[in-house]
Amino acid sequence: MLTVLIKILGIFAIIVVGYIATKTNIITKESESSMVNLLILVTTPCMAFSSIVSKELDSSISEKIILVLLVSLAYFIIMPILVLPLGKIFTHTPKEDVGVLMAIMVAANAGFMGFPITKAIFGDHFFFLIVVQNIILNIYLFGIAVLQMNYGSESKFDIKSIIKSVMNPCVVVSLIAMVILFTGIKMPEPVMDITGMLGNVTTPLSMIIVGMRLANSKFDSVLKNRDLIIASLFNVLIAPLCAFLMVNWLPFLTDDVKLLIIWASAFPCAVIIAGLAAKEGRNATLVSEGIALTTLLSLITLPIAATILTSLYLH
């Protein structure tokens, strides 16, 4: 348990570095978009590719892949339905923004933050599983979350643009890596070395970006928004509790799959939701505030979640 806490503190220390570097203008605000592009288009896909292709496929791994995909799909169908009636509690929010708050409640940053933190804390096996989970997460983010944000509006659902968005570089690379894994193709050692080295950049880079975002966030208005605080607390506390109640009692799930599903739900609001909100003409500012607040809260909740899950499922 102490080892887990030490690893988490080490990762979060990099967030502090990013925060201080931004506040002291060592890193400029304008450089964030380039760093995010490097993360999303290069280092994270390399990290995912290296993790999947380096796996040795057996019946156990194949079963876990199927279970993670199916349980994740069930989670992202059940949760949006579960939060739908809860929209009535947001009495201080304009009707057109209620759907945005519901998306904040469910969307989890299990890719951008989840990949590097999972690899650092739980190791390669759980990182492999969260890469698999991320395939379903992307379907939720670019499909169901868009529907949530348009709750109560008359916006049309464009299936073609949804499919195009779902097939982002990380998902495409993950699917290609899955094909390589299941066909037994052996990749040349230089390819594995290069993707492995680039993938290792993901953890410090992503944590520095999180620190930058916190440094550029204005928390004065956020802390006055009662409904946003409720939605954010649901995201980091109630959502993982719901995941626990969904999977802990299922006898056909192994402990590592249970841990992964709960852990993946414990991350703060996904960064991509802000971009999707802007694209859909929803309140992107509100989403950005939700991302900042849930990320700040996760600095407390993620170490607690990791410690509890380790004691419950890793013996």
Image: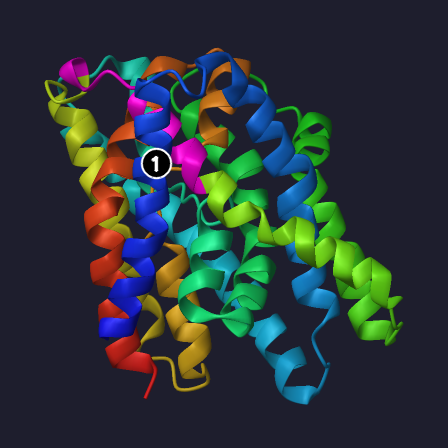
Left-right relation of 139 to 231: right
> 45 left or right of 233?
right
> Which x, y percent locates residue 108?
40, 45
Q: Position of residue 13 (x, y in %)?
A: 31, 46
Say which residue appears at 32% left-offset and 29% top-offset.
19
Residue located 75% across and 64% down the image: 178
Depth check: 195 or 181 in front? 195
How many numbered marks appear? 1
Circle 1 SS class = helix
Q: Which residues are magenta?
A: 207-221
Residue beneath the point at 48% across and 40% down: 206
Q: Which residue is mark 1?
A: 17
Dividing the picture into quadrants, the one containing residue 63 is: bottom right
Q: Please tell me whether residue 103 belongs to the stretch shown in magenta.
A: no
Q: Specify the color scheme.
A: rainbow
| Quadrant of the frame with the C terminus | bottom left
Which residue is at a point 11% across and 24% down the rendered structure image?
Answer: 226
Quadrant in which the N terminus appears: bottom left
